[in-house]
Image (spheres, rainbow, N blue to C red):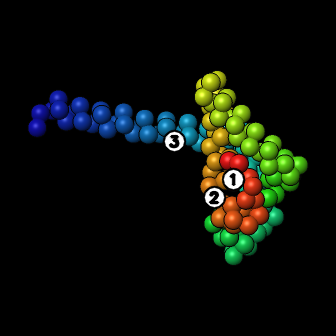
C-alpha cells in the first residue's frame, strides 16, 4: 500500500468518527428538546407512579388501558374528538407538510394499533368508525 492511500483511509476513518459523534450529539439534543406528545406524557406519568412487573408488561403489550385513560382525561370520553384529532393531524401533515402533525398522527395510529382488547370489548364503535 502506498503512504497516500493509507493517509486517505486514516483521514476517512477520522471523518467518519467525527460524523458519528455529531449524529449522536444531535440525536441526544433532539430526544431531550423535542416536545412530548400527550401519549408520551401519559406513559411518563404512569412510569412515575411506579408500576411494577406484570402491570408494566401488560401495559406494553396491550395499550387499551392507555387509550381509555387518554380518552377520559384529554378527550372527555368522546371517541369522535379523538378521531377528529387523528384526521386533523393527518391533514396537517399531508397538506401543511407539518412534522408535528405527522408525529401526532403516527402516535395516535400506534396507540390504536397497540390495543388488543379495545376493538373487541370496550371501544368497538371507535374502531368501526376508524
Report the residue at 80% width, 53% height from top: 70
Name which residue lies at 64% across and 23% down: 96
1 left or right of 91? left
Residue at x 69% of width, y 54% of height = 127
On the picture, is 11 further left or further right than 116? left
| Along the viewing direction, whichever of 50 and 96 lies nearer the viewer | 96
Q: Position of residue 51 (x, y in %)?
A: 76, 69
- Across and down, in percent, residue 3 comes to 15, 32
Q: State the CA–CA distance, disc 2 to disc 1.
A: 16 Å
CA–CA distance in space, label 1 to label 3: 42 Å
Give the image location of residue 42, x and y in percent: 77, 53
Nearest to N terminus: mark 2 or mark 3: 3
- Label 2 crowd bin: few (<14), some (14–19), many (20+), radius 10 Å: some
Whether residue 106 is situated above or below residue 61 in the rendered picture: above
The residue labelled by disc 1 is 128
Pick out the residue farthest to the bottom: 54
Q: According to the image, label 2 marks what residue?
A: 114
| Alpha carbons under labels 2 and 3: distance apart | 29 Å
Q: Nearer the viewer, mark 2 or mark 1?
A: 1
Q: Quadrant of residue 4?
A: top left
User: At numbered mark 1, what does the secondary structure look like: helix, strand or loop?
Assistant: helix
Circle 3 residues within 10 Å: few <14, some 14–19, many ≥20 = few
Element under disc 3: helix
Position of residue 98 relative to residue 86, above or below, is above
**Furthest residue in direction top, as rendered:** 96
Name the image quarter holding the N terminus. Answer: top left
Residue drawn where x is 71% and y is 62% of the image: 118
Tag in front: 2 or 3: 2
The image quadrant that residue 66 belongs to is bottom right
First in sequence, mark 2 or 1: give its number. Answer: 2
The residue wearing badge 3 is: 24
Amino acid at each position: 500500500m502506498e503512504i497516500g492511500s493509507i493517509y486517505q483511509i486514516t483521514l476517512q476513518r477520522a471523518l467518519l468518527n467525527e460524523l458519528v459523534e455529531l449524529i449522536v450529539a444531535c440525536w441526544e439534543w433532539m430526544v431531550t428538546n423535542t416536545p412530548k406528545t400527550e401519549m408520551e406524557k401519559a406513559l411518563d406519568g404512569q412510569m412515575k407512579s411506579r408500576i411494577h412487573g406484570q402491570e408494566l408488561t401488560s401495559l406494553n403489550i396491550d395499550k387499551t388501558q392507555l387509550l381509555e385513560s387518554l380518552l377520559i382525561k384529554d378527550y372527555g370520553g368522546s371517541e369522535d374528538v379523538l378521531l377528529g384529532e387523528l384526521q386533523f393531524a393527518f391533514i396537517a401533515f399531508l397538506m401543511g407538510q407539518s412534522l408535528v402533525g405527522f408525529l401526532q398522527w403516527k402516535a395516535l395510529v400506534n396507540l390504536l394499533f397497540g390495543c388488543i382488547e379495545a376493538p373487541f370489548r370496550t371501544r368497538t364503535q371507535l374502531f368501526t368508525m376508524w
